[in-house]
Image (cartoon, rainbow, N blue to C red):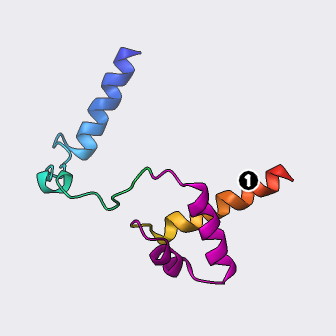
């Protein structure tokens, strides 16, 4: 088995050369970027969930709802919680 591996390795080196694959240098600045969201793990309160549902019933868009909710909510967070609420209500019924 080892001889087969060595043969395959030799054939690959012959075909593609023994030059190592170039890798991108690590960017130290990338790891120092600030986080995009301040409240990554926000615990939604019952009041916030009710307000979210009320705002959506007024046919507001997700971006408008996020601004109305405050606390640096994003449109994606509001959309996700709204659908979680709908799924939970369907499971209860």
Magenta stretch, overall SS: helix
The image position of residue 40, as x and y in percent, is 40, 53
Asked if 3 appears above or below 18 in the picture, the reply is above
Identified at 17% across, 42% down, the residue is: 20
**Residue name at image x 31 percent, y 62 percent:** 36
Left or right: 12 with respect to 57?
left
Tell me: 85 left or right of 23: right
Is residue 22 rendered magenta in the image? no
Q: What element carries label 1?
A: helix
Q: Which of 89 and 80 is in front in this view?
A: 89
Q: Please state, as top left, top right, bottom left or bottom right, where the N terminus lies in the image.
A: top left
- How crowded pointer 1 is (Cα within 10 Å; few <14, some 14-19, many 20+) is rated as few
Residue 14 relative to residue 64: left or right = left
Where is 24 relative to 65, above or below? above
Q: What residue is at 54 percent from the left and 67 percent from the top?
A: 78
Compared with 64, 42 (above or below) is above
Q: Residue furthest front?
A: 47
Front residue of 22 and 28 = 28
Which residue extends farthest right? 93
**Residue numbers of the magenta segment:** 42-71
Is residue 51 covered in magenta? yes
Q: Position of residue 17 (x, y in %)?
A: 20, 43
Residue linked to disc 1: 88
């Amino acid at each position: 088995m080892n001889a087969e591996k060595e043969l395959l390795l030799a054939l690959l080196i012959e075909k593609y050369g023994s030059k190592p694959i170039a890798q991108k240098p690590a960017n130290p600045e990338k790891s120092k970027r600030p986080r995009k969201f301040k409240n990554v793990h926000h615990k939604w309160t019952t009041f916030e969930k009710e307000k979210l549902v009320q705002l959506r019933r007024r046919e507001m868009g997700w971006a408008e709802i996020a601004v109305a909710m405050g606390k640096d909510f994003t449109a994606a967070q509001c959309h996700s919680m709204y659908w979680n609420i709908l799924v939970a209500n369907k499971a209860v019924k």
